[in-house]
Amino acid sequence: MRRMLIGSVLVVSLLVGGCATNAPKYNTDFDNVAKLRAASLAPVRIGEITKDPASKHDVNSITIRGGTLTSPYGSYTAYLREALEQEFTDARLLDANSPIEISGVLLRNEVDAGISKGTAEVDARLVVKRSGSVAYDDVKTAQLDWDSNFVGAIAIPRANENYPKVLQKLLGEFCADPKFLAALKK
Amino acid sequence: MSTLPKCCVLLAVLALAGCAHQIVITPELRSLQLSGSPIDKKVGYYISAADMETEVTTAGGGGDKVAYHPYKELEPALQKVLFNLFRDVQRVNSFNDASLLKQQGIAYVFVPTIRTESSSSGVFTWMPTHFVVLLSCTAYDDNAQRIWSGNFSGTGEAEFSELKADFSAAAHKASLAAFRQLEDALSQAPEFRKP
């Protein structure tokens, strides 16, 4: 009986808590691509995406129920860069030699798999420079909620799957900003 | 046995009972490569609201099952293929309303049909080691006339070492293979290059 009890407690602990998992790779949001393609933009290159050294929380570290969510691109600043690169590639607007550069700072990067509700919030600053001069500099926020679960085996994969979606939403905020699009015009 | 241990045992039994594990079958879209210049036409695709919500349950390993939404999760792959080949793409609410298609400037509408199968050689793990995506696609012109169709079959196999990091690895491979075949077929079809 004692063994059975210990085993059950162990299983419950595993179900509630988590271990290290990989975030899914980014996939383009084609609503964003449609906006970029429709806006008659000039090709761009994607510059550096950094983190804010003054930030209390390390944006390159995400913990979900005690387990680490690892970026498949090595860091979450690299994840945001990859997301930008994919969207502009699919919009046929990426050119490594372009004088227009998009760079940025990942300011906030949090995922929480609560008992009943999961949330993710990402804040980023994007800067557009045309031949070295700043044409755009703004911060956008994206937040996403979903139904979570007490059981970690359900809640953690659900949180993982939502991480790329909150980044899609973040880039959607920029793609919907007329000032961002104006800074990228031909 | 006091209440707390009883609850732990009950919870463990309930949680480990053969439920359907949720997976996501969207492939890595970056693997669907951009072709040369896109065809200078706006096209649409049609997936019914009911299909978008459809959840499918198929076999996993160890007597467990996996559940997923084939249309919702493969819509991005269809978008990627169409955006690779055509100038502009939009989702439409009908594939046979010729006046609406003309009004929206849509030259062709693509209608996918998706079926899936899965199985596993694993006894102790639930993730499918074998996955099949059967994709059919029909294209209609702006007169709502059927002008093209194709059937594609993508198969994915995954070892336990891959499944540890990606529970849906076999599904990702199968869906990628099916949409690669679709992209190849569409890029070679002369029907879409007519002026």
Image (cartoon, rainbow, N blue to C red):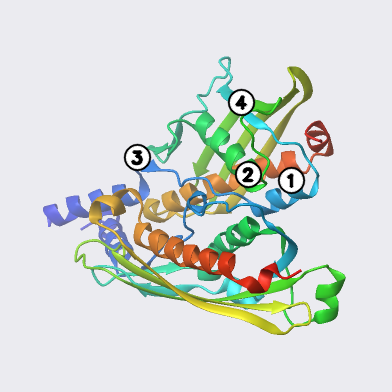
Quadrant placement of the N terminus of chain B: bottom left
Point out the tag, 3 or 1, that comes first from the N-terminus: 3
Residue A20, numbered label: 3
The reply to whether dot 1 and dot 2 touch (C-beta < 8 Å) is yes
Residue A87 is labelled as: 2
Picture layout, residue A11 above or below residue A103: below
Dividing the picture into quadrants, the one containing residue A88 is: top right
Return the residue found at the far bottom.
B145
Locate residue A46, reporting x and y percent: 62, 30
Image position, residue B147 (x, y; %) = 66, 81
For residue A12, say whether it is visible.
no
Residue at 72 percent across and 52 percent down: it is: A34
User: Dot 4, how many residues are within 10 Å of its Cα: few (below 14), some (14-19), or many (20+)?
Assistant: some
Q: Earlier in the sequence, mark 4 or mark 2?
A: 4
Q: Nearer the viewer, mark 3 or mark 2?
A: 2
Splitting the image into 4 quarters, where does residue A42 fall? top right
Q: Which disc number belongs to residue A47?
A: 4
Residue on which the image places disc 1: A36
Disc 1 to disc 4, C-alpha distance: 18 Å
